[in-house]
């Protein structure tokens, strides 16, 4: 809520009441800091997302996660990096409908597991003799989430049984599903072969 009040001088609930209002062109890109509780293993999070990225919709490069998004029939894009001066991620959001920003931020917080309290979680895990050394070695691991239920289902059904010679890369089957079922979009910055799964109300 502090983030929204700083950016817009109003609360998330007041933004939602705006309805279908669009962001003026000059304000088309909004940068938001999403705070988390340290420790946070950003390289591990990026590595997980990169291994499962759906080509044409998601991209992990230059220490950043980028993707196109769809909410309520409107599409845009987000890019997420890690802040170097505080415990936070930096999200650059391009989306034409101002009232959708709270929903976009909520989904980003879910994808990057930003509501977790790693110290409290680790305190419980270290009570297990087998888990304790693993927690000590990797204390900042978080559990990545999904943008929505449909994408999670696509990833799960597209995951190959093994990654041996001749098998598809983890994202290849999902890319094929995206080409068959997705919608081509142009966010003005990415390659022309950018596609998204249109939002499904029952899979949020």
Image (cartoon, rainbow, N blue to C red):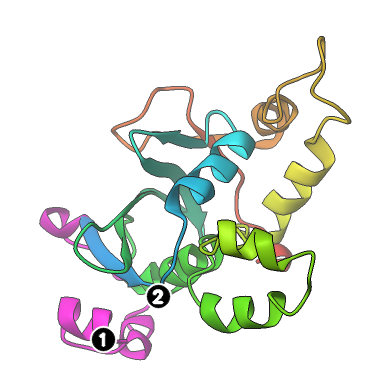
Q: CA distance from mark 2 to mark 1?
A: 12 Å
Query: Could you tell me which residue is drawn at 80 percent across and 45 percent down?
Result: 156
**Label 1 CA crowd tier, 10 Å (few <14, some 14–19, many 20+):** few
Image coordinates for residue 39, horizontal then vertical, percent = 44, 68
Q: Where 30 falls versus 43 (above or below)?
A: below
Q: Where 10 falls versus 175 (above or below)?
A: below
Q: Nearer the viewer, mark 2 or mark 1?
A: 1
From which residue to which does the magenta span run? Answer: 1-28
Q: Which residue is mark 2?
A: 102
Q: Secondary structure at mark 2?
A: helix
Q: Which residue is mark 1?
A: 2
Magenta span contains residue 8: yes
Query: Could you tell me which residue is drawn at 73 percent across and 43 percent down?
Result: 155
Magenta span contains residue 138: no
Left or right: 145 as drawn, with respect to 163:
left
Image coordinates for residue 91, horizontal then vertical, percent = 32, 58
Image coordinates for residue 20, horizontal then vertical, percent = 36, 71
The image's mark for residue 112 is: none
User: Of residues 176 and 145, which is closer to you in this image?
Assistant: 145
Q: Look at the image and tell me in which quarter the C terminus lies.
A: bottom right
User: Of residues 70 and 165, which is closer to you in this image?
Assistant: 165
Query: Could you tell me which residue is drawn at 69 percent across and 24 percent down?
Result: 172
Q: Secondary structure at mark 1?
A: helix
Q: Where 98 falls versus 156 (above or below)?
A: below
Residue that extends furthest to the right in the rendered view of this protein? 161
């Amino acid at each position: 809520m502090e983030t929204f009040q700083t950016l817009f001088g109003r609360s998330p609930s007041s933004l939602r009441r705006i309805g279908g209002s669009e962001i003026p062109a000059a304000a088309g890109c909004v940068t938001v800091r999403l705070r988390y509780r340290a420790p946070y293993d950003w390289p591990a999070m990026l590595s997980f997302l990169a291994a499962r990225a759906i080509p044409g919709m998601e991209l992990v490069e230059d220490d950043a996660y980028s993707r196109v998004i769809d909410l309520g029939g409107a599409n845009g894009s987000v890019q997420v990096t890690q802040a170097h001066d505080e415990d936070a991620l930096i999200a650059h959001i391009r989306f034409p409908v101002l009232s959708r920003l709270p929903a976009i931020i909520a989904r980003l917080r879910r994808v990057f597991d930003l509501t977790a309290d790693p110290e409290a979680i680790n305190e419980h895990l270290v009570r297990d003799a087998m888990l304790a050394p693993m927690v000590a070695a990797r204390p900042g691991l978080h559990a990545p989430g999904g943008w929505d239920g449909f994408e999670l289902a696509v990833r799960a059904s597209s995951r190959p049984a093994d990654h041996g010679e001749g098998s598809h890369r983890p994202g290849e089957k999902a890319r094929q599903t995206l080409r068959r079922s997705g919608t081509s979009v142009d966010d003005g910055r990415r390659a022309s072969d950018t596609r998204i799964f249109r939002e499904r109300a029952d899979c949020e």
